[in-house]
Amino acid sequence: MEYLQRLAAYTSWANRLWLDFAYDTAQEEGYLTRLVSHVYLAERVWFQRIRGEATDKDVFKTQTKVELLDLADQHLHRYSDVLSSDLRRVLTYRRFTGDEYESALSDILLHLFTHGSHHRGQMASYASQKKLGPPNTDLITFSRIQD
């Protein structure tokens, strides 16, 4: 579980760097604000599923920085709650297609980590093409800062 805690901390750190970059450095780039919003909104949906709450299906709307900062804070607590629970617990949920699935909490966490990494890579590629100097959110960079 310690490794998953580290990945949750890394994910939160990397997402926050991109949030700040998208809204403070490259706000005119709607692609970046939309995609960083999507990362946070998709995380929220998974945390809603885990908690048995109704899900907000609009995961592609652009949020304000203040709204995302609030989600970032909430997600830190949600990661902590999930990590302190039984990660072998199997969750039954419905995708937006209506299909029903079952997944262990540990797999849902790994999905969240890789989903965020996927989109941060897309944002980095886009920002590099636009010569915006994207933030370095490599795991090894996080590791050096944390140790």
Image: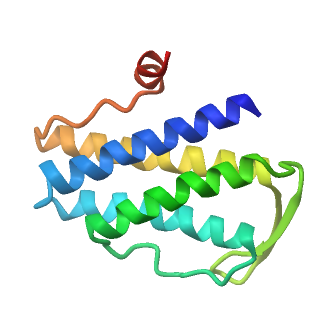
Q: Is residue 90 above or below residue 67?
A: above
Q: Which of these two is toward me, 146 or 50? A: 146
Please state, as top left, top right, bottom left or bottom right, where the N terminus lies in the image. top right
Q: Position of residue 64 (x, y in %)?
A: 27, 70
19 is higher (above) or lower (below) than 1: below
Q: Using residue 4 as the reference point, say whether residue 23 is left or right of it.
A: left
Q: Quadrant of residue 96?
A: bottom right
Q: Does 9 sit above or below residue 94?
A: above
User: How many labels sit on residues?
Assistant: 0
Rendering colour mode: rainbow
* Residue 33 falls left or right of residue 122: left
Front residue (pair 40, 125): 40
Location of residue 24 in the rendering, given as x and y in whole percent from the top left corner: 15, 52
Q: Quadrant of residue 52?
A: bottom right
Q: Is residue 93 above or below residue 81?
A: below
User: At x 32% / y 42%, what residue is drawn?
Assistant: 17
Q: Residue at x 69, y 80 (%)?
A: 53
The picture places residue 106, in percent across and down from the top left corner, at 77, 47
In-front residue for pair 134/69:
69
* Residue in front for this viewpoint, 77 or 28: 77
In the rendered structure, the answer to whether residue 64 lies left or right of residue 110 reads: left
Quarter of the image holding residue 40? bottom left
Residue at x-position 49% and y-position 49% = 116
Locate residue 75, reporting x and y percent: 54, 57
